Image (cartoon, helix red, strand yellow):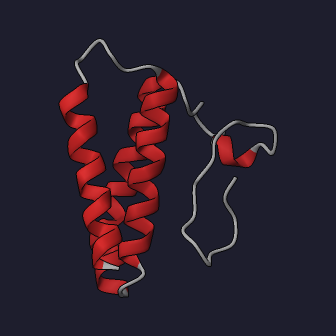
Amino acid sequence: MEQAAEQSIESACHLADLVSPNAWSTAAAEDVLDAIDTLTEALGGAGPELAQALAAVAAATTDARRRLGIIVEGHAPEDDAAAPHRVMRGAGRSGGG
């Protein structure tokens, strides 16, 4: 697990080195927000106190989606089966797409 966590930070650092304020597309931003949500959910699985501490991250990514127009108030993309929104899951977990 440590190796996978290390790979995720290396990927995040690589992305941070590549971006500039004008380089973001909505699709790229949504992919990053999905990654943040997935990592937050995974880390929150370590215990309820940690999950509670990370609840602010989920609220922040939801707010970011709203500001980017990815979420329309009262209608999250995951509520619509036809929406392109996806949350990737690690090996051995159901869901994904």
Q: Residue at x 35, y 74 (%)?
A: 43
Residue 68 sits above or below residue 43 on the image: above
Residue 7 sits above or below residue 3 on the image: above
Quadrant for the N terminus, please: bottom left
Residue 89 sits above or below residue 44 on the image: above
Rendered image quadrant of residue 84: top right
Whole-percent x and y of residue 11? 30, 48
Q: Residue at x 39, y 35 (%)?
A: 64
Count up the numbered dots: 0
Q: Nearer the viewer, residue 81 or 12?
A: 12
Q: Residue furthest right?
A: 82
Rendered image quadrant of residue 20: top left
Whole-percent x and y of residue 37? 44, 56
Q: Nearer the viewer, residue 21 or 55?
A: 21
Whole-percent x and y of residue 26? 48, 23
Residue 67 relative to residue 82: left or right = left
Q: Residue at x 44, y 19 (%)?
A: 25
Residue 32 sits above or below residue 37 on the image: above
Q: Residue at x 72, y 48 (%)?
A: 79
Q: Residue furthest top?
A: 22
Q: Residue furthest bottom?
A: 47
Residue 28 relative to residue 89: left or right = left
Whole-percent x and y of residue 49? 29, 84
Q: Nearer the viewer, residue 93 or 34?
A: 93
Rendered image quadrant of residue 7: bottom left
